[in-house]
Amino acid sequence: MSNFATTRRFSIAGFVFAAIMTLTLQGSLLMGFDQIAARGHHGLVPSTMLARTQPARAAVTLERVVVTSRRA
């Protein structure tokens, strides 16, 4: 076994580094998502737009059918 696996000490420097890296990553993701939200659908090419952003298709109304008998 390595010394890393058997040593049970807390490293302040490691914790600070991990916290800074986590905050940096989360902050950059939030800034990126904020930029995408601010642009809205104007920055997207048509192939990447969601289907719900397209206008609704015309509805088709079918005639009512009454079943008078059934097959044996």
Image (cartoon, rainbow, N blue to C red):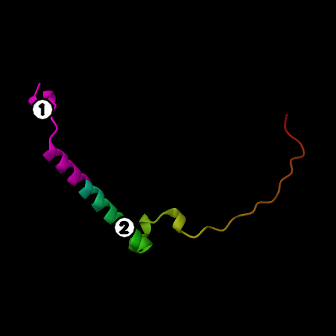
Work out whether 30 lies above or below 10. Answer: below
Residue 32 coordinates in the image, percent (x, y) = 32, 65
CB-based contact (under 8 Å), mark 1 and mark 2? no
Closer to the eye: label 1 or 2: 1
Residue type (three-letter) at the residue carrying disc 1: Phe
Q: Residue pushed farthest top?
A: 1
Residue 63 magenta-highlighted: no
Residue under the image location 12 percent in, 32 percent down: 4
Question: Which span is picked out in magenta?
Answer: 1-22
Gap between marks 1 and 2 measured at Cα? 40 Å
Magenta span: predominant SS is helix
Category of crowding for the residue at label 1, using alpha-carbon neighbours closer than 10 angstroms: few (below 14), some (14–19), many (at least 20): few
Residue under the image location 66 percent in, 68 percent down: 58
Question: In the image, 51: left or right of 64?
Answer: left
Q: Toward which corner of the image does residue 45 lie, by quadrant?
A: bottom left
Work out whether 35 lies above or below 13. Answer: below
Residue type (three-letter) at the residue carrying disc 2: Asp
Question: In the image, 29: left or right of 15?
Answer: right
Residue 59 coordinates in the image, percent (x, y) = 69, 65
The residue that disc 2 covers is 34
Residue 24 coordinates in the image, percent (x, y) = 24, 58
Where is the N terminus found, in terms of image quarters? top left
Disc 2 is placed on an element classified as helix
The residue that disc 1 covers is 4
